[in-house]
Each structure stands twice: as structure tokens, then as C-alpha cells.
């Protein structure tokens, strides 16, 4: 059976004398480090960060090599937009210090520097007047081997050295996932009250590299076996990994030729490794085998790969939390809701992830499907709670012309281009048979609501609450606007609480002609 990646390399080391082994190990480190060069196309990455308002110098950080411990960092910048900023800080801190997220399912403590059990109200008071804050989730792959609190303190000290200033911060360590991780919130003003600015490079790369340096110092470098295992595990990951970076760097005109990838680094068989990865990606239609070493693959395939990972993670989360089969779980988007609405009971509400303010609902419908819906900024008029019966739908593109538009147009033509509610109501009482229990006033009110919308769009001119100036090309304008809207409109999710029976608007009768 053919040996796995780096197996023969490891065997060579074990067969040598101590002197020879030391010499070969040194050569191996140089050779295997070329992997990083293949991935990034360069050996160094500059990560800049600092206090621009204080004129701090740029910070240059050498990127980690393949022997360094790996750390995942998620970051978010939260701007103080006034309304709700204080509540956002409080809600986030309450969430990261929630029950069951700490060691052995206990409540995690909030800490800062050498201070333990920090009170949320004190943090909110300190942070609320700052121009912004930074949220980080830092997840070392070997977090179960670390004192996470000590690691966090060391990371903040490294950040302070880089920025040449003291920062105010608070953190909580979580153990409720496979990998322990820390939630770190850094205030947008330093300890002297001056605005704290972090560059994009420092946020996205610098902090991750500093964290990796600390973990590597505490645990030690990865050995050859760990590197080999991680490369082989990456082959069958449904999320972006190091192998995908290698693949992307070799895609030309939406094709990759495996034979063009170098395989001379101490038997590191990139051809085999990449071939296995492409075969895995082919299962999800991200690429297709053309012939021999030639594959068809788009340069931006990792975007779809990341979406696949996100979708599968959400389904897994719903399945585990609700104790239901995955096939009974569904993710519904605003686009899908454009075609249908869903009705059911809210069985869960929480944040999308530990760094976002956005929330999601899980709805159980009559078919016992568990449906995941992400809320948007204006999805709710009234906050939805667990146990509520709700209807989830999407806003629609502008539609028209409607029967009511033709009615308004016909009435306006007869009145010199003016639509008057009083004249419409008078006409209905004499000439129109309305559905039972619908008055002429209620019927006219439906038309007035429509005209209010059209007035805000500039399609009619509002004279007063019950009188509108209707242009001669009224119907044509509505038709043109509807066509434009259909091409550009992005639907938004709306949630309606069904605490009372839904009273549907009475459907309008066919157009009325005076």
C-alpha cells in the first residue's frame, strides 16, 4: 500500500544517527516550510496596526510557518451609532457569560488583566461612551492543553506591545464546543481615553499570528506527524483549508493541471494530495475531472465551499439542539420566502454566532419540520418570543398595476386628473355591490393606502390625506417601476406574530368605471 504524505520522510529521520538526524531534521524544516510559500506565494506577510491618532508606527509581523500551532480568529468591529449601542454591549456580555458555556457546563467568568468576576454593569459604563469596540473569538486548535485565561492575558499583552499603549478589555473563556475558545472585547478607547484604531491587516492577520506564537511557545512546535495528519485530514473537509489555497494559486482560466504542481520537497506528493482534494470537491460539483491531470474548477469556488460548510453546520446545530433528524431540518432564506411563507411555533431564539448581534429563530411547522430563519434589522415590529405562533414571509418587489390602480386612474380621468376619496365613496354607494360586512369607507381606505405608497415613490402627488393628483401616464409609470423593481429588488424577511386571527384584506373587485 502506498505510504501517506510525509511517511517516508519521517522514516528517513528514524533511520539516521543522532548527528545525521539532527542535520536531516534541519533540512526537513527548510523543505517543509516551502509548503507555506506554495500556499501564500510569499514567505512574509506584513500585518499593520496602531494608533493612527497618536501617529504610531506600522507594525511588521512575520507570518507563522507550517510548524507553528494554528489558531482561528474571528473579528468584528462595532461602531457606536448612538441608539442601542449601550444595549448591544450589555447583551453581548450577557451572552458570552451565559450559563453552561464555561468549564464542565458552568457559567464562565468575565475577567480583565488580573481582575476576576468583572461585573457587566461596570464594563458597560466604561465602554458605552467609546467610539467603537472590537470583538474577537480566538480559538487555538490545542485549547484543551492550555490555561485559556493565561493565554488571553498573554495575547492582550502582545497586542499592547504592538500598539505601544495599554488597552481596556474584558474576556470570557468558553468550553461548550469541541475546541475551547475565548471571547475578547477590546474597548475603542485606550486606557488614556484616546481613540483606538486597529488596521484591517492587524485585525485579520496580526492578532492571529501573535496568538499562534503564544500557543506555540506554550505547547511547542508541531512535529512531522501532526503536519502530515493535518494535511491528510484537510483532504475531506467541507470547509476551506490550506489545500484550497494551494489549488487557488494554480488555477488558470478556470482549470488546474496537477502535473504543474511541484512534488520535489522530500517526497511531499502534492499531486496525490491535490488529486484527492479535487475528487472530494467533485462530489459537491465544485469541480470536474476533464482528463488525466486536468480539472475544471472556478477561481472563486471557495465561496460556495464556505456556504456549504455554514449550511451543514447550521443543520447539525438544529438537529442536535432539537433532537431531530437532519432531514427534518431546513434553512430558509428571504429568496425562498419570496415563493412561499411559513407558519409555525417558535421553539428557539438565539444569536447567529457568538460574535454577531443578529439573531435567528427556529420554527416548528405543522409537518414537524424545524426551520431556521435569520432575522434582519427590521424583520420584527414586535419581538418574537419562544412559544409564539408566527408567520414568516418576505417582502415583495413593487407590483403593479393592480385593479385598484386602474380604478383610481379611471376615477381621476373623470375628475380632471384628481382622485378624491369622497367622490369614490359616493360612487361606490350608488354603483358597486361590495362583499358582505365591507363598507364603502373601508373599501376606499384600501385605495388610499396604496396611493400613500405610490406618493412616497413619486408616482402620484399627494394633495391631502384623501386627495391625490394622478398623472396621465399613471398606469404606464407603475408598469415601468414594477419592471425595474423585479430586476433589482432584494427581498427581506418579515415576522408576524399570530396572537390574533389574521384578518386578510378583502380582495378588490374588478376595476370600477364611472
Image (spheres, grey):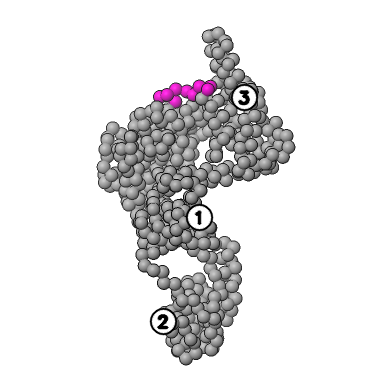
The residue under label 3 is: 268
Q: Which residues, given as a range, are shown in magenta?
A: 216-225
Determine which of the numbered discs, if any, sits on residue 333 in the image: 1
- Which residue: 43% across, 43% down? 320
- Which residue: 62% across, 30% down? 273
The residue under label 2 is: 437
- Which residue: 42% across, 24% down? 219
- Which residue: 49% across, 63% down? 395
Q: Quadrant of residue 353?
A: top left
| Mark 1: secondary structure | loop
Q: Residue furthest right?
A: 291
Q: Is residue 218 magenta?
A: yes
* In the image, residue 292 above or below residue 318: above
Q: Nearer the viewer, residue 514 or 73?
A: 514
Q: Quadrant of residue 118?
A: top left
Q: Residues within 10 Å of mark 2 (few under 14, many from 20)?
A: few
In the rendered image, residue 458, in percent from the top left (x then y), is placed at 51, 73
Q: Is residue 63 visible?
A: yes
Determine which of the numbered discs, if any, sits on residue 123 in the image: none
Amino acid at each position: 500500500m502506498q505510504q501517506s504524505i510525509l511517511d517516508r520522510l519521517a522514516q528517513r529521520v528514524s533511520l539516521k544517527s543522532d548527528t545525521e538526524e539532527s542535520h536531516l531534521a534541519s533540512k526537513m524544516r527548510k523543505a517543509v516550510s516551502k509548503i507555506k510559500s506554495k500556499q501564500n506565494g510569499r514567505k512574509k506577510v506584513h500585518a499593520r496596526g496602531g494608533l493612527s491618532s497618536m501617529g504610531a508606527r506600522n507594525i511588521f509581523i512575520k507570518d507563522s510557518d507550517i510548524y507553528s500551532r494554528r489558531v482561528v480568529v474571528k473579528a468584528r468591529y462595532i461602531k457606536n451609532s448612538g441608539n442601542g449601542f449601550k444595549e448591544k454591549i450589555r447583551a453581548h456580555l450577557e451572552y458570552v457569560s451565559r450559563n453552561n458555556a464555561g468549564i464542565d457546563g458552568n457559567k464562565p467568568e468575565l475577567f480583565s488583566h488580573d481582575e476576576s468576576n468583572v461585573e457587566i454593569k461596570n464594563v458597560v459604563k466604561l465602554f458605552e461612551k467609546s467610539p467603537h469596540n472590537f470583538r474577537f473569538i480566538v480559538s487555538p486548535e490545542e485549547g484543551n492543553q492550555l490555561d485559556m485565561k493565561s493565554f488571553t492575558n498573554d495575547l492582550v499583552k502582545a497586542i499592547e506591545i504592538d500598539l505601544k499603549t495599554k488597552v481596556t478589555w474584558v474576556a470570557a473563556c468558553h468550553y461548550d464546543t469541541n475546541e475551547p475558545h475565548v471571547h475578547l472585547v477590546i474597548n475603542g478607547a485606550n486606557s488614556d481615553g484616546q481613540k483606538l484604531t486597529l488596521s484591517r491587516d492587524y485585525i485579520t492577520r496580526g492578532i492571529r499570528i501573535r496568538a499562534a506564537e503564544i500557543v506555540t511557545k506554550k505547547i511547542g512546535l508541531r512535529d512531522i506527524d501532526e503536519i502530515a495528519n493535518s494535511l491528510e485530514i484537510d483532504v475531506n473537509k467541507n470547509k476551506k483549508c490550506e489545500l484550497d489555497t494551494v489549488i487557488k494559486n494554480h488555477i488558470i482560466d478556470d482549470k488546474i493541471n496537477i502535473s504543474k504542481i511541484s512534488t520535489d520537497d522530500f517526497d511531499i506528493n502534492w499531486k496525490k494530495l491535490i488529486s484527492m482534494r479535487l475528487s472530494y470537491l467533485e462530489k459537491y460539483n465544485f469541480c470536474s475531472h476533464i482528463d488525466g491531470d486536468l480539472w475544471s474548477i472556478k477561481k472563486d469556488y471557495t465561496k460556495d465551499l464556505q456556504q456549504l460548510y455554514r449550511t451543514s453546520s447550521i443543520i447539525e446545530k438544529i438537529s442536535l439542539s432539537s433532537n431531530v433528524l437532519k432531514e427534518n431540518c431546513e434553512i430558509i432564506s428571504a429568496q425562498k420566502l419570496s415563493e412561499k411563507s411559513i407558519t409555525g411555533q417558535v421553539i428557539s431564539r438565539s444569536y447567529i454566532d457568538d460574535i454577531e448581534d443578529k439573531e435567528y429563530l427556529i420554527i416548528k411547522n405543522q409537518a414537524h419540520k424545524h426551520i431556521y430563519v435569520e432575522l434582519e434589522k427590521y424583520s420584527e415590529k414586535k419581538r418574537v418570543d419562544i412559544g409564539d405562533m408566527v408567520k414568516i414571509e418576505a417582502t415583495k418587489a413593487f407590483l403593479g398595476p393592480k385593479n385598484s390602480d386602474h380604478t383610481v386612474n379611471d376615477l381621476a380621468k373623470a375628475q380632471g386628473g384628481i382622485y378624491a376619496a369622497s367622490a369614490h365613496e359616493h360612487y361606490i354607494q350608488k354603483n358597486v355591490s361590495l362583499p358582505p360586512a365591507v363598507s364603502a369607507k373601508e373599501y376606499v381606505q384600501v385605495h388610499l393606502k396604496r396611493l400613500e405608497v405610490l406618493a412616497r415613490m413619486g408616482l402620484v402627488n399627494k394633495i391631502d390625506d384623501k386627495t391625490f393628483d394622478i398623472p396621465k401616464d399613471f398606469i404606464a409609470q407603475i408598469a415601468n417601476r414594477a419592471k425595474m423593481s423585479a430586476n433589482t429588488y432584494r427581498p427581506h424577511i418579515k415576522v408576524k406574530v399570530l396572537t390574533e386571527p389574521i384578518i386578510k384584506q378583502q380582495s378588490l373587485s374588478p376595476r370600477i368605471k364611472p
